[in-house]
Every structure is written in C-alpha cells, then in structure tokens.
Image (cartoon, rainbow, N blue to C red):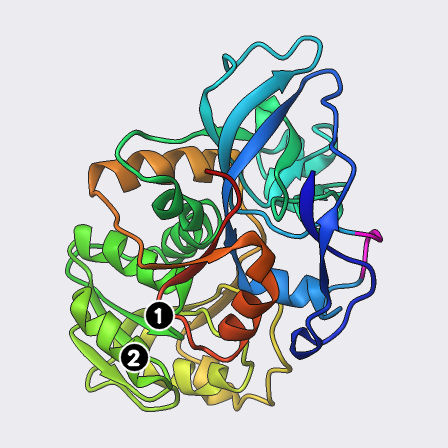
C-alpha cells in the first residue's frame, strides 16, 4: 500500500516523511481493517515527527484523525458491517485493567497505545484498529469535514467540559487553530461569549466569522474578565497572561499534549482560587458525546485538503500557522 512514513524524527523543514510502499496490515482478533479515505493533520503529528514526543517505533506511519470504510474484519469483530464509514482517533487502545481504566478514566491509562505514535496511523491507504476504539461517523459530514472532529474536535470538547463553562459566561481562547475553530462552535451553541487571542490576523478573522465577541494579540488582555480560558497554543509563556485575564475563581485549561516551559508565576495570579488544569488525551465517551453534539449543532470545519504525497508540505504549512482551520490529507477516492 502507499503510505507516508517516518524513519528518524527530524524538523519538518527537512521533509522527513517518505512516500512509498509499505506493508499492508492485517486485522487481528477483535480488530478491523479500514481503507483510509482521509486523515487530518494535527499539531501532535508535528511533535511526533520532530521528536518532541519520545519516539515509540521506527518506521512509523503518523496520523490519528482517520476517516475510512471497513474493508475487512478480524476474528470476533462484529460491531461494524463491511463498508461502514468509521473514524479512528488518537486513543488506539487501553489495557482496561489499571486503576484509571477501572475508575472510568481511560484517558489516563497506565499502558495506552496511541494511533500514529505507538502504532501506525492514517497517513496510509489502510490502517487497523480495535473495533471497540473505532467511532461511527454521523451522516451529514463529508469525509474531509469529519476528519478534524476526531482529535481537534474531541480534545476541544474535553477542554470545554473541564473548563466548566456555562451559557452566559465568558471564555477565552489562546491560539485559534484546528481545535479552537471547532470548540468555538460548541461554545457559541451553549450561549457562551468567546474572546480569542491569537497572533495571526487570518485566525483572528476566522474567530470573528465564527462568533467571537473580541479578538486580539496572543498576550493582549481582553476587555473584560473571563470566567474560564483555554490555551490551545503550545506556548507556556501565555500562562501568566491568561491567568491575569481570569476573574476570581476562574479556570485555566491547558489543551495541548506538549507545551514549552511555563515561566515563574507570581502567587497573586493564582490566589483567590484561580485554577490551572491540564488535559490528557480523551475517553471514548468524550468522543461519542462530542460526535453526537457536532451532528446536532451542526459543526462545520474549515479545511485545506492536500494529497497524501504532500504530507510534508501540509506539516510545514501547519507549523508556520499558514492554515486557518485544519489540514486534511486525501488518501483514497
């Protein structure tokens, strides 16, 4: 099969992904083989490819926002008929036995596997996954529109839930890429006022188009105090500015899997019961709840489509903030 794969982590400016033939996987018991239609390009892919996340395997096929159709089923896999359109996300599998899984916190599993990181992902014509960790994709979303929902959307939704934001409250977004451009649609559906701080004028324009009440520079203070804020950008230096924007008792959510060092924080920024909380992965329940909600709203993603062979170009564009919304690879027709 055709795939884009990584042999050694390197800066994306060096175009480290190779495009060529790769062994087609076969589904084991309880797994499905999916013919990939599209795969979203996520900032986490950058961290994997450039080695900011410690390498787990080589060679590796990245990609964890996969939309495709069931091509074959392993022994005992009966959840989806052949030909069903499905999605595969970041959480590939959990052990199901550790204390976190037993407590319903499978996103914190002690021995997880991750799509496109510890197992091969969706920058390829075929992928295998445990059927229990595969999502049904709601009707009404074209493939390329659905792909960003599977990470940017699910993680944005988990950030919103952990922020405990409610209708009529004020929410800040720091960074306005793929996750934020989906999360704002959910927040506005809930009646939340959104204030977006981001450095790129194109991203500010998209935020206003999607209903932001105010947009400004990344470290600029919004005109009002916020009930909660989410930092989507991987920049630790934003944390003090975001805390400064919160009201007493406000909640700050860190939405990335990787972030640069957070500078020293004066205690007065945390005092009066302000809270900082990170987000780690997601549960399957997060994914199921979000996809249902996305279909109800309905969420509309802004995407730029690239051919599979152009994966390096898509990653370079993403790294340079040149994509308002999300990048998606078209793998099969």
The dominant secondary structure in magenta is loop
Sequence-wise, which precedes: disc 2 or disc 1? 2
Badge 2 density bin: few <14, some 14–19, many ≥20, Cα 10 Å: some
Q: Is residue 145 above or below residue 244?
A: above
For the residues marked 2 and 1, what is the alpha-carbon distance in whole angstroms? Answer: 7 Å
- Confirm whether the magenta stretch covers residue 277: no
Q: Is residue 54 above or below residue 332?
A: below
Between 153 and 119, the residue placed more toward the observer is 119
Residue drawn at (48%, 19%) of the image: 83
Q: Residue at x 18, y 51 (%)?
A: 189
**Left or right of residue 87: residue 64:** right
Question: The C terminus is located in which quarter?
Answer: top left
- Residue 178 image position (x, y, % from top left): 40, 62
Magenta range is 55-59
Residue 125: image location, x then y, percent: 61, 39
| Residue holding disc 1 | 324
- The N terminus is located in which quarter? top right
Residue topped by disc 2: 202
- Where in the figure is residue 314, as x and y percent of width and height? 52, 66
Q: x, y (%) of residue 60? A: 76, 51
Q: Is residue 257 visible?
A: no
In which quadrant of the rendered view does residue 253 lie? bottom left
Q: Nearer the viewer, residue 178 or 230?
A: 178
């Amino acid at each position: 099969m055709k795939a884009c794969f990584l042999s050694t982590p390197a800066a994306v400016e060096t175009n480290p992904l190779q495009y060529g033939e790769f062994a087609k996987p076969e589904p084991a018991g309880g797994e499905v083989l999916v013919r990939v239609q599209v795969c979203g390009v996520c900032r986490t892919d950058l961290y994997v490819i450039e080695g900011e996340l410690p390498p787990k395997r080589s060679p590796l096929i990245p990609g964890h926002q996969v939309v495709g159709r069931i091509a074959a089923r392993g022994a005992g896999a009966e959840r989806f008929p052949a030909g069903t359109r499905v999605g595969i996300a970041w959480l590939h599998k959990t052990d199901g036995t550790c204390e976190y899984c037993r407590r319903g916190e499978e996103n914190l599993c002690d021995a997880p596997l991750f799509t496109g990181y510890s197992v091969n992902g969706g920058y390829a014509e075929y992928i295998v996954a445990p059927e229990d960790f595969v999502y049904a994709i709601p009707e009404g979303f074209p493939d390329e529109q659905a792909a960003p929902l599977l990470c940017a959307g699910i993680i944005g939704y988990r950030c919103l839930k952990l922020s405990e934001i409610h209708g009529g409250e004020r929410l800040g977004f720091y960074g306005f890429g793929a996750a934020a451009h989906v999360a704002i649609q959910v927040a506005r559906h809930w009646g939340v006022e959104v204030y977006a701080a981001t450095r790129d004028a194109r991203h500010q324009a998209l935020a206003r188009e999607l209903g932001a009440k105010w947009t400004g520079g990344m470290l600029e203070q919004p005109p009002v105090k916020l009930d909660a804020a989410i930092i989507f950008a991987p920049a630790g230096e934003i944390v003090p500015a975001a805390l400064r924007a919160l009201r007493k008792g406000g909640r700050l959510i860190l939405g990335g899997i990787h972030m640069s060092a957070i500078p020293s924080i004066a205690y007065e920024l945390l005092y009066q019961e302000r809270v900082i909380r990170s987000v780690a992965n997601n549960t399957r329940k997060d994914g199921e709840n979000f996809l249902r909600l996305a279909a109800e709203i309905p969420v509309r993603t802004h995407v730029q489509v690239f051919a599979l062979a152009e994966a390096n170009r898509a990653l370079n564009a993403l790294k340079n903030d040149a994509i308002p919304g999300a990048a998606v690879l078209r793998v099969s027709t």
